[in-house]
Image (cartoon, grey):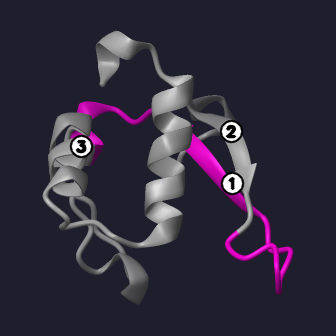
């Protein structure tokens, strides 16, 4: 999938482990047309199981302990802090 820079909003930068590394991870909101969310072909092995879910599903998965990795939880926190409360 290719998106233009106008579709990307950097919400914040986070660091995975400030005690050891100073890696920079951008937390971004990417606006894509609905047609992109229906079927996305990619050749990147990291995205082989890509699926689009609504924010309410992510919130439920975190509450149920299905999402537990620190980077995703930190990115979700940034998203929640930046997004209007009505969109959670």
Q: Is residue 37 above or below residue 23?
A: above
Looking at the picture, does residue 86 appear above or below residue 55? above
Q: Is residue 17 above or below residue 53?
A: below
Q: Which numbered disc, 3 or 1, marks the residue closer to the eye?
A: 3
Q: Secondary structure at mark 1?
A: strand
- Please tell me which of labels 3 and 1 falls first in the chain: 1
Asked if labels 2 and 3 touch by Cβ distance under 8 angstroms, the answer is: no
Residue 26 image label: 1
Residue 31 lies within the magenta run: yes
- For disc 2, the neighbor class at 10 Å (few under 14, some 14 to 19, many from 20) is few
* Residue at 33% from the left image edge and 32% from the top image edge: 33
**Corner quadrant of residue 85:** top left
Residue 9, by quadrant, is top right
Residue 63 appears anywhere in the view: yes
Query: Looking at the image, is mark 3 or mark 2 nearer the viewer?
Result: 3
Q: Position of residue 1 (x, y in %)?
A: 43, 57
Of residues 63 and 86, the one drawn nearer to the viewer in this rendering: 63
**Disc 2: which residue:** 10
- In this rendering, position of residue 6 left or right of residue 60: right
């Amino acid at each position: 999938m290719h998106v233009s820079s106008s579709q990307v909003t950097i919400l914040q930068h986070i660091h995975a482990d400030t005690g050891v590394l100073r890696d920079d991870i951008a937390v971004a909101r990417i606006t894509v047309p609905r047609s992109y969310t229906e079927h996305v072909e990619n050749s990147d092995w990291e995205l082989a199981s890509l699926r689009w879910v609504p924010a309410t599903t992510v919130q439920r998965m975190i509450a149920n302990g299905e999402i537990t990795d620190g980077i995703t939880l930190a990115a979700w926190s940034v998203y929640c802090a930046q997004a209007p409360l009505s969109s959670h």
